[in-house]
Amino acid sequence: MSFSILPTSGGSRNIIMALEEARKRNLLTVALLGYDGGEIKRRGLADFPIVVRCDYIPRIQEVQATIYHTMREMLEAVARD
């Protein structure tokens, strides 16, 4: 599994290239995106795009951090079981 914490816009070229490569390698991807999800959402580059629909960058980043930490804790709990 590959996790990607992405810039707010969802349009950074290096992240898009990484997601394209992940797709070629059949890796599962989760993308945390802001605004409307940008190019990553439009092109379907992530298996699980999670979009924080907001235009206030600090709020987007707060929500993304919360989502990330919650997912990490859940995965750690699953791994322990």
Image: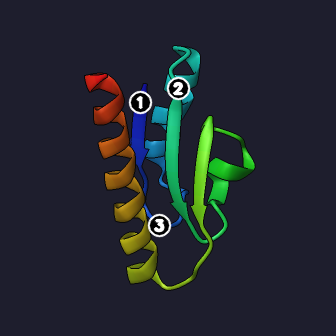
Label disc, if present, on residue 2 of the rendered structure: 1
Q: Residue at x 62, y 34 (%)?
A: 47
Which amino acid lies under the numbered mark 1 shown in the image of this protein?
Answer: Ser
Q: Are marks 1 and 2 in contact (CB under 8 Å)?
A: yes
Where in the figure is residue 27, as x and y percent of width and height?
Answer: 50, 20
Residue at x-position 58% and y-position 23%: 23
Judging from the image, what secondary structure is the residue with disc 3 in?
Answer: loop
- Alpha carbon separation for disc pair 2 and 3: 21 Å
Name which residue type carries label 3.
Thr
Q: Which mark is residue 8?
A: 3
Q: Which mark is residue 28?
A: 2
Name the N-terminal-most of marks 2 and 3: 3
Taking 60 as reference, is 80 above or below it? above
Measured from the top left, where is residue 58 in percent x and y? Answer: 38, 81
Separation of disc 3 and disc 1 at Cα? 18 Å
Q: Nearer the viewer, mark 2 or mark 3?
A: 2
Direction from residue 39 to residue 80 in the image, left or right:
left
Q: Is 21 above or below relative to 29? A: above
Q: Residues within 10 Å of mark 2 (few under 14, many from 20)?
A: some
Q: Nearer the viewer, residue 7 or 30?
A: 30
Location of the N terminus by quadrant is top left
Q: Is residue 30 above or below residue 63?
A: above
